Amino acid sequence: MRLALQEFFEGRKILVTGAAGFIGSNLVLRLLKTGARIVGLDNMNDYYDPCLKEYRLELIKEAAKKSKGLWQFVRGDLSDRALVKSVFREASPAIVVNLAAQAGVRYSITNPDAYIESNLIGFYNILEACRHSYDNGAAGVAHLVYASSSSVYGSDAEIPFSTEDRADRPVSLYAATKRSNELLAYCYSKLYAIPSTGLRFFTVYGPAGRPDMAYFGFTDKLRQGKDIEIFNFGNCKRDFTYIDDIVEGICRVMEKPPARTQGADGLPGAPHTVYNIGHGEPVDLLEFVDILQQELVRAKVLPADYDFEAHKKLVPMQPGDVPVTYADTSGLERDFGYRPKTSLRDGLRAFAEWYQEFYMNDEYL
């Protein structure tokens, strides 16, 4: 860890929403090492097995005991405005990292209400709380960092995806809510000079990740002897980004809020910006599956003689999906000197080893 980063976060008050989630929990674990004072918020919903969220929280509790940082967890929902106001009032965070959201592209087609409640109403409550953190001359929130998604680019964006693209043709409700978050954040930044940064994440993966993601779901199905479905008949590419690289990017962005400036109209400028965080090297889905199966055999999740070809099923594209994701990370490199670097094989190896220990070790059965 860079010394400057350590010094910046030590003793700083930080609110992390979605703290029991995949990205949120890993971010908290990283920040605890710096001596930050962290309040985590999560509703612990059952979109996927809550036991995995409880497991992540246990890792955080153990890490907090060994660190100089402070940790407090609040179980609650962002759509509860009174709760959000209470958390802000009691925590007085200098930095807010909003990672809480209803995730999943296909789930948004069948369960739209969850996305409106969490991703729109919940995010609005965060913005309002940030706005009022400046009341009565208080220092307030110095930086709001929030999760967006590569899904905002839709299916007809130019390759590689650039934050300069308009991104106004989403192909799923999930993507529409994330693009709405960016527009709302810009508006609040313009009106109330709230420094805010949106991060468009590209296919995040790694140990203790989300079970609804392809690499995790494929592993579960292969272990059970079920077929895995490879969409668009295998003609898909994804920009896979390892969790540690995502966390490093978030930390660097947290450290440097957009500057408050004067606009050409004589009014305050909007201290708001958006970055892609992706590996910048899309991988063919069939190649991804091949590497995954090799690492699952290596970790002894699957036997060496497993017949993978018999369990692969090529199927059409699903509604809401896009054929290619590919991050232009030049903005992140320019402003922070950072680009994700973990190879897909190294990342999937770490996942396979974790999966073997967590699901196939007698200690966890």
Image (tube, helix red, strand yellow):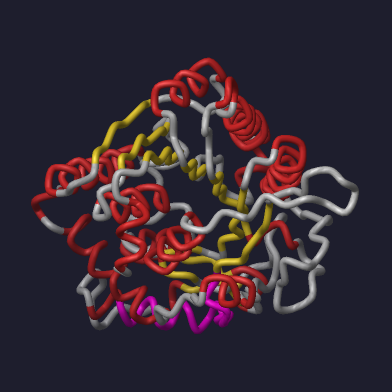
Q: Is residue 24 above or below residue 235?
A: above
In the displayed orientation, state which residue is furthest to the right. Answer: 265
Vertically, is 306 above or below 138? below
Q: Nearer the viewer, residue 66 or 269?
A: 269
Report the side of 5 relative to 156 (left or right). Answer: left
Residue 286: say if magenta: yes
Q: Specify whether 106 is left or right of 347.
A: right
Rendered image quadrant of residue 208: bottom left
Left or right: 78 as drawn, with respect to 267: left
Residue 352, image x and y in percent?
29, 69
Left or right placement of residue 34 versus residue 125 in this view: left
Q: Position of residue 5 (x, y in %)?
A: 36, 62
Which residues, given as a range, are shown in magenta? 278-295
- Residue at left 79%, top 75%? 158
Q: Quadrant of residue 93?
A: top left
Q: Residue furthest top?
A: 82
Residue placed most toward the observer, 215 or 135: 135
Quadrant assignment, res 7: bottom left
Please check the rendered image and state whether residue 116 is part of the magenta-colored stretch, yes or no.
no
Foreground of the two, 128 or 171: 128
Q: Most prominent secondary structure in the magenta stretch?
A: helix
| Residue 154 locus on image (x, y percent) | 76, 61
Which residue lies at the image location 41% right of the left edge and 61% below the top edge?
247
Is residue 165 placed above or below 364 in the rendered structure?
A: below
